[in-house]
C-alpha cells in the first residue's frame, strides 16, 4: 500500500492558500467598498471614498480571477 | 446487443441513488446561506439544483476512473452493483430522516464493497486503495477544511472590524451567493460523476459499451438531472442541522466556510481523491463557527456526526452484502430486494411526514449561543 503523501500535502497547501487568499481579498474588497458611502451614524471609514473604490474593485477582481483560474485548470 | 432488464433496473437504481445524493447534500452548499438569510430557501435550492447540473458537465475524469482499483472490475456484474446501490440508498434515506449529514459517497463505496465481498469474496476488494484513497482523505479533509474556514473567518472578522457593520454584512451576503454557487458547482462535478461512473461501469460490464469507454452524453444528462432534481427538492432536515444546530452562523462565517469547502473539493478532485463533499462542508462549518466564538459551537453535535461518519461505510456495506446475497439467489431474489428496498424507502418517507421540515420552517429553531452572548432580534451579540 502506498499513500500519496505528496499529493495529500499538495491538496492541503493549495486549498489552504487559495481559500485564505480569496477570503482575505473579498474582506479587503468589502472594507474598500464600505468606505464609498459612509453612513452618518456609522464608524469613520479608514479610506477615502475614491481609494476605497479602487481598493475594493482591485481586490474583488483579483479574487474573481483566482476562482476562474481554478475552474479553468479543472475543466481544461 | 440490446440492454437487458437487469441493466435497466441498475440504471434506474443508480439514478435513484443520485437523486438521494442530491437532496442529502443540498445542505453542503446552501445550509449557511439559508441560515444567514443570504438566499431565500426556495431560491437557494433552485440555484443549487441548476448549478449541480452544470457541474455534471464540467468533467468526466472521476467518472472514467470511478472503480479506480477499489474493487476488482473483472468480478463485477450488474447484480452486485444493484445490491450495492440498494445499500447506499437505504443508508442515505435513514440518515436523512435523522437529519445527519453523512457522506453519500461513503454510502456508495460501502454498499459496493459489501456487495462485492458477498458475491466475489473479500479478495476482490482492494483494501490498500480503500485506506489510501478513501479512509485517509476522509479523516484529513474535514479537519483541513475546518482549519481553513477558521483562519478565513478570523481574517474576515479582523479585517472588517472597523468598517461599517451594515455594508460589511451586505458585502458578505453577496459574497455568500457566489461562494455557495461555487460549492454547488463543485458538488455537481464530484458527486454526479460517481453515478455516471456506476452506470458506465454497468454498461461496460454488460457489453453495451466498449471497455474503457467514457460515459455517453445521455448518461451525463440523466445523472446531472437526477442530482439537480434531488438538490432542488432539498434535504431540509440536514439543512437545519448544519445551518442552525452547529453554531449561530453569520454571513462572514458562511462565506469563509463555503470558500474553504470549494477550495478543498476542487483541489482534491483534481488530484483524484474521492472526497466526501458532505464531510468537507461540515468541517468548514464547524471551523467557521469556532473562528468567531469557540464557545458558540455545539461540539456534542460534532460527536453525533462523527459517529454517523464512522458507521456509514460499514452500515451501507452490511445492507449491500445482504442485498447481494439475496440478489445472487436469482430473479426472485432480485425482485425481493427491489420490493423490500421500495418498502423501506416508503416507510422512511412516511416516518418523515410526522415531523416535516420544509422550506417554510427550516430556520424555525434557535441556534446555540455562547454562555456570554445574548439573543437579539438580528442574531446574537456580546452580553
Image (cartoon, rainbow, N blue to C red):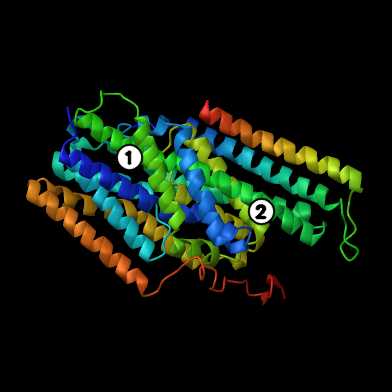
Label 1: state its secondary structure: helix
Residue drawn at point x = 88 percent, y = 57 percent: A38
Q: Which mark is residue B153?
A: 2
Is any part of residue B326 visible from this angle?
no
Image coordinates for residue B13, horizontal then vertical, percent? 26, 47
Q: Nearer the viewer, mark 2 or mark 1?
A: 2
A6 left or right, relative to B178: left
Q: Residue at x 90, y 58 (%)?
A: A44
Name the residue rendered at 17%, 57% in the picture.
B339
Provide the chain ID for the residue under circle 1: B
Question: Mark 1 packing: few (<14 Cα in 10 Å), some, or many (20+)?
Answer: some
Would you name the residue on which mark 1 appears?
A: B130
In the figure, residue B192 lies in which quadrant?
A: top left
Where's residue B97, x and y in %? 36, 65
- Name the residue located 40 percent from the left edge and 44 percent from the top edge: B225
- On the rendered structure, is A4 left or right of A34? left
**Rendered location of residue B281, percent (x, y):** 51, 51
Q: Quadrant of residue A29?
A: top right
Give left or right: position of B171 versus B307.
Answer: right
Report helix, strand or loop for mark 2: helix
Rounded to the nearest angstrom, the CA distance separating label 2 from label 1 is 33 Å
Amino acid at each position: 500500500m502506498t499513500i500519496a503523501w505528496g499529493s495529500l500535502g499538495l491538496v492541503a497547501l493549495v486549498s489552504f492558500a487559495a481559500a485564505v487568499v480569496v477570503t482575505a481579498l473579498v474582506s479587503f474588497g468589502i472594507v474598500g467598498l464600505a468606505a464609498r458611502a459612509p453612513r452618518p451614524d456609522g464608524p469613520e471609514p479608514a479610506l477615502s471614498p475614491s481609494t476605497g473604490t479602487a481598493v475594493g474593485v482591485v481586490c474583488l477582481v483579483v479574487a474573481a480571477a483566482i476562482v476562474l483560474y481554478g475552474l479553468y485548470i479543472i475543466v481544461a | 446487443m440490446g440492454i437487458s432488464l437487469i441493466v435497466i433496473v441498475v440504471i434506474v437504481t443508480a439514478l435513484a441513488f443520485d437523486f438521494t445524493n442530491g437532496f442529502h447534500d443540498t445542505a453542503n452548499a446552501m445550509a449557511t446561506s439559508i441560515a444567514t438569510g443570504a438566499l431565500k430557501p426556495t431560491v437557494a435550492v433552485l440555484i443549487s439544483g441548476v448549478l449541480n447540473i452544470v457541474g455534471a458537465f464540467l468533467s468526466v475524469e472521476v467518472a472514467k476512473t470511478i472503480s479506480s482499483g477499489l474493487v476488482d472490475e473483472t468480478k463485477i456484474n450488474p447484480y452486485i452493483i444493484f445490491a450495492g446501490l440498494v445499500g447506499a440508498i437505504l443508508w442515505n434515506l435513514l440518515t436523512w430522516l435523522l437529519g445527519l449529514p453523512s457522506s453519500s459517497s461513503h454510502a456508495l463505496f460501502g454498499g459496493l464493497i459489501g456487495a462485492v465481498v458477498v458475491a466475489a469474496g473479500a479478495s476482490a476488494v482492494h483494501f490498500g486503495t480503500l485506506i489510501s484513497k478513501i479512509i485517509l482523505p476522509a479523516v484529513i479533509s474535514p479537519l483541513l477544511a475546518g482549519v481553513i474556514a477558521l483562519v478565513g473567518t478570523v481574517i474576515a472578522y479582523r479585517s472588517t472590524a472597523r468598517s461599517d457593520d451594515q455594508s460589511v454584512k451586505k458585502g458578505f451576503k453577496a459574497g455568500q451567493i457566489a461562494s455557495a454557487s461555487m460549492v454547488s458547482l463543485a458538488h455537481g462535478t464530484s458527486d454526479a460523476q460517481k453515478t455516471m461512473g456506476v452506470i458506465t461501469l454497468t454498461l461496460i460490464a454488460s457489453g453495451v459499451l466498449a471497455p474503457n469507454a467514457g460515459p455517453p452524453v445521455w448518461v451525463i444528462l440523466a445523472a446531472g438531472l437526477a442530482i439537480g432534481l434531488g438538490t432542488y427538492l432539498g434535504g431540509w432536515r440536514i439543512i437545519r442541522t448544519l445551518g442552525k444546530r452547529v453554531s449561530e452562523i453569520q454571513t462572514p462565517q458562511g462565506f469563509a466556510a463555503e470558500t474553504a469547502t470549494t477550495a478543498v473539493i476542487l483541489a482534491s478532485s483534481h488530484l483524484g481523491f474521492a472526497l466526501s463533499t458532505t464531510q468537507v462542508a461540515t468541517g468548514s462549518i464547524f471551523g467557521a463557527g469556532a473562528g468567531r466564538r469557540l464557545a458558540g459551537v455545539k461540539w456534542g453535535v460534532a460527536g453525533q456526526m462523527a459517529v454517523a461518519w464512522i458507521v456509514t461505510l460499514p452500515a451501507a456495506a452490511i445492507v449491500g452484502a445482504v442485498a447481494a446475497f439475496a440478489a445472487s439467489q436469482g430473479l426472485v431474489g432480485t425482485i425481493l430486494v427491489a420490493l423490500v428496498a421500495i418498502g423501506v424507502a416508503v416507510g422512511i418517507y412516511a416516518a418523515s411526514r410526522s415531523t416535516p421540515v420544509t422550506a417554510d420552517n427550516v430556520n424555525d429553531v434557535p441556534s446555540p449561543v455562547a454562555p456570554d452572548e445574548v439573543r437579539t432580534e438580528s442574531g446574537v451579540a456580546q452580553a
